[in-house]
Image: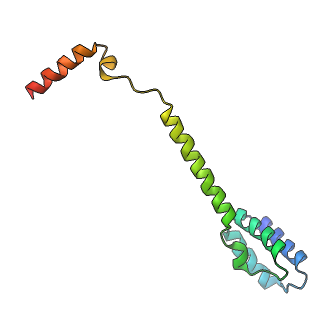
Amino acid sequence: MEREAAKKIIKRLAACYPSWKIDRDIAGIWLEELEAADGDHVEANVKEYIKENKFPPSISEIIKPNQRIEANREIEKTRKYIEEQKAIENKPPTDPPWIREGISKEDWMHRIIAEGKRA
């Protein structure tokens, strides 16, 4: 997460929880932890936390993986995989070997049988 975005998160939490005792040292620790965290998860966790809790959060409650975001990412990965599989299925079939070689099927089969007898 970017430093400026992390600062906004701290300011938002401080505004929503006026009784939250935060000084420079605590803010520094929060900044360090928020910068190392996934910004999407942090943003979602802050929004959910503010809606559901009347007391200030701990760092772990804010930087933890957000289940909704993780689920959406898995859904997107699955959707992409399905699209890739459909693209493979819709690919025109490869021409048979006799067409690739420019000969008739019978000539190709005679050649294969003759090669098998020599082996």
Whole-percent x, y for residue 50 in the image: 83, 73
Q: Quadrant of the C terminus?
A: top left
Q: Quadrant of the N terminus?
A: bottom right
- Relative to 11, say whether 72 is above or below: above
Residue 31 in view of the camera? yes
Q: Residue at x 80, y 65 (%)?
A: 4
Residue 1 in view of the camera? no
Whole-percent x, y for residue 78 in the image: 57, 50
Residue closest to the eye, 66 or 34: 66
Q: Residue at x 18, y 18 (%)?
A: 111
- Relative to 46, say whether 22 is above or below: below
Q: Residue at x 82, y 81 (%)?
A: 56
Q: Residue at x 90, y 75 (%)?
A: 15
Whole-percent x, y for residue 106 in the image: 23, 14
Displayed quadrant of residue 22: bottom right
User: Taking 22 as reference, is 106 left or right?
Assistant: left
The chosen color scheme is rainbow
User: Taking 5 as reference, is 18 left or right?
Assistant: right
- Relative to 37, say whether 88 is above or below: above
User: Taking 26 as reference, is 63 left or right?
Assistant: left
